Image (cartoon, coloured by chain):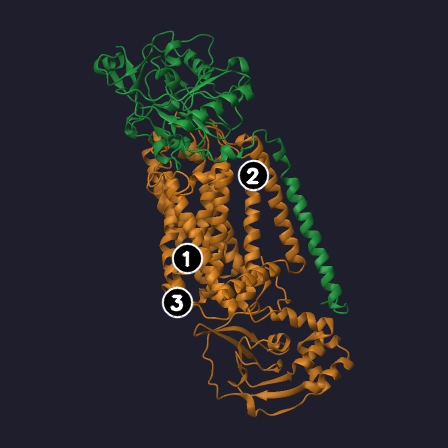
Chain colours: A orange, B green
Amino acid sequence: MSAHLRDFSRFLWRSCRLATEGDWRYYAWIGLLFLATVLGVNAYAKQFAQGLATSGMNDHVAWGVYIANFTFMVGVADAAVMLVIPVYLYKREELQDFVIFGILLAVVAILMSLAFVMVDLGRPDRFWHMIPGIGKFNFPASLLSWDVIVLNGYLAMNIYICGYLLYRRYRGQPPVGWHYIPWIFLSIFWAVAIHTVTAFLYVGLVGRPFWNNSIVGPRFIASAFVSGPAIVILAMQMVRRVTASGSATERQIPNREAHLADHSSRPATLEDFKALAKFLPELAHVPNETLSKCLPGSAVVEANEGEVLLWQGDTDREAFFILDGRVVVKREENQRERVIRNVGPGEICGEISALTGTARTATAVAESPVKVIRMTATALRRLLQHPKMNQVVRTRMTERLMITDKALLTLRSIVQVSIVVNVFLLMNELFKEFYTDDLHAASAHYLYFGLDGKTALVPWIWTAVFCNLGAMALLMLPVSRSLKVLDLACVLAIVGVWIEKGMGLVVPGQIPSPLGEIVEYTPSFDESLICIGIWAFGLLCYTVALRVAIPILQGRFSAKNGDTKPIPTAG
Amino acid sequence: MSNSQESPARSSRRTFLAKSAAAASGLAAMAAALAPLRDLDDFTNVEEFLRKHYKELTPDELAQRLKIIEQKVKERHDVEAEVKALAPMDGVEFVYCLNLTRCIGCRKCVHACVKENNQSRSPEVQYITVLKMPQGTFDLEKGDTEYQPAAVPEDGSFYMPVQCHQCRNAPCVQVCPVEATWQEPDGITVVDYDWCIGCRYCVAACPYFARRFNWKQPSIPKEEINPDMSYLGNRPRPVGVVEKCHFCIQRTRTGRYPACMEVCPTGSRKFGNILDPESEVSHILREKRVFVLKEEAGTQPRFYYYFDI
């Protein structure tokens, strides 16, 4: 037990160390987010000292952007299930890599929602009154007490699931099904619960006709399934940008018999390196003296299609520069193999084991007849003494987390369906409000057209309408199979849903007031800073989480592998 | 990688120094960001942090709490106050009746209430909102709450004061996540200002706009403090909590009328015990044309409106 604890604390310590390492882009990004967080903390310190009068809220509009963002973030957290369901219920394996990212996003989103609730409290010093068993918990009457339970429960189970999966991966052990699958299935139901309960916070208020509307719950779920996967699509594209490249198709790994023991090989010459330099321009900068020092450990090998250059799990130490033909790199995990890289002339494979001394992280198979330069670890190290070569090889070492186009397009179809449902439900709501045009339609009138000359929300809601319809149009057209267009559609959808939940639901629900007064609301500068601070803090957490999770998923950061030097920029 | 010529020890020392500098400046920035906390004049001490819910106080603890509140009033406002925790009377359920035929919209009730209940003067917190309604409608959106004529009443209008309706089926009580607000046996919905977390869910839930939040530290001039205070009523409130009309609990539980009723120059306001068939309110509910606001909300108010004719 204590050994376990020691291993785990070592894991945490190493993760912290890893999170502080990165290139200048990583530091710049972290620094920027930290700065925004500090500004938010400063604004909150003011609010804490002076009271919520520093916000733009008033007795008429008593809930503003904090609660709006809270509601939006619960939706984002909810959407992690949109990654979990396809993988665990429908075995859509292309999303497997995404599950951890989705669950991490859920964890961060819940932390952010809790932060938004905390900054909204008039007496944050009394938060413990809400803790079941310690405080006085008005359960089940108050929907807010339900929310305390479902949000914290969801947070706990998601921290457990992603922590478990990542830690097992870090230790190089396959996860044990019954240790986490039951929680995954529970979290699917739970995710629906967090958003439904949050919707019921509003639906349950008889004095607010705009909220007291049974369509709010379904609309929350529909819009969450738009914004959540859209955020994941954008985040994954960022991860892909800074880590990996290429797409791949899944294939069978050949039999172990087809090893390259009997390949024809001959010692390499300077001419072979010249030939390689055609595909690898950086090599041309390496002086001949250096190359000559590498020759003793280098050989030119030819292999036929289907022959294996190196086996996952083996402990040999050679690296292969491809001179001709293509090599496919596959990784086997949980009885499942996945192409993680496909390399051609000028590229290298096998360098991780050569440089770090770890077991092979993948199997490399000749996709066609190939000609490669096989180098011993010593020879490779000599070559890497040249900074240019060092840089190019180290960078490529990070390029092995697969986020396939296919996976992104699967998410696209989820957003596609959800946005149509969301717009359909919106139409239902608008019909009911404007066709009957009873007194209860006043909030909708105020929101869409203004009331008594007060029009603060009108530009917001029409921006949201434009964004939602624009995103829907793009998503329905084949043009959004192009990832650039898909990104645009996702941004529009996220902005649309964010406005819909905030300026389009939380605020107009309180205007007019129950006594028919129209008092408008604009968030104050400090209030906005606090929101930006929480967003920055959330992004900071997500960046750091990815910074640690990605090398684990790539197999570069593990219990056996101390070398985390090759550094990708996360976020 | 570009500094591969350097010795590893030197480069790692440099990294360590750079990271320490970054961590130190990060901490300094965070400390500077927290500077506004120096303005905090009323920081929660341990006794306040650990305070119990009103209903869980033993009689001794309650007596001690009342003493502490009196001391605090003395410190803050230099006023000798008497803070009581009056129990509800047996066989009493309070209701309020308001005569729309008579009300002239003078707002004397609004100001008497502010004075009696030690509401903050800056910003001013008012429990009663008076709507000036054009005759011929009950659409609240047609009402005007900011009317400022030279003289009331104005022709073509009637006036409808709204305050806490002390609902039997109170949405505010239902939604409070920490039971900081509840209904007493005599029908008054009260708030424990020492337990409220300031989430304002009750403010959002109330269909009658009866609840007020202390966005700032309340401020009351010393000479305007009403020293006759009650724990669940008009004792000074801290910043960040919700308050509301409590039928002047410090008066009504000792047999007196609420301040708004006493000050009303037209006799539009009637208050009493609905369980006593001889009371004025029982008589009104039996004999007059009575209605409640937003009956469709199902809140079952203890606040009735009626007409003379």
Counting residues from the start of the chain, the first of labels 2 and 1 encountered is 1
Left or right: residue A282 versus residue A449 is right
Determine the residue positioned at 64% across, 40% down: B33
Instruction: Estimate the x, y position of residue B95 in percent, counting from the top left.
Output: 30, 19
Instruction: Estimate the x, y position of residue A40 in percent, counting from the top left.
Output: 59, 41
Mark drawn on residue A528: 2
Relative vertical location of residue B111 with respect to residue A508 in this rendering, above or below: above
Determine the residue positioned at 72% across, 56% down: B18
Local packing at callout 3 (Cα closer than 10 Å; few below 14, some 14-19, many 20+) is: few
- Is there CB contact under 8 Å for labels 2 and 3? no
Instruction: Estimate the x, y position of residue B293 in percent, counting from the top left.
Output: 31, 23
* Residue occupied by mark 1: A82
* Residue occupied by mark 3: A177
Write down the quadrant of residue A185 in the picture.
bottom left
Dot 3 falls on a residue whose secondary structure is helix
- Report the amino acid beneath label 1: Met
Dot 1 falls on a residue whose secondary structure is helix
**Closer to the camera: disc 1 or disc 3?**
3
Write down the quadrant of residue A322 in the picture.
bottom right
Write down the quadrant of residue A508 in the picture.
top left
**Closer to the camera: disc 2 or disc 3?**
3
Relative vertical location of residue A292 with respect to residue B128 in this rendering, above or below: below
- The answer to whether residue B71 is seen in the rendering is yes
Spatial CA distance of label 2 from label 1 is: 30 Å
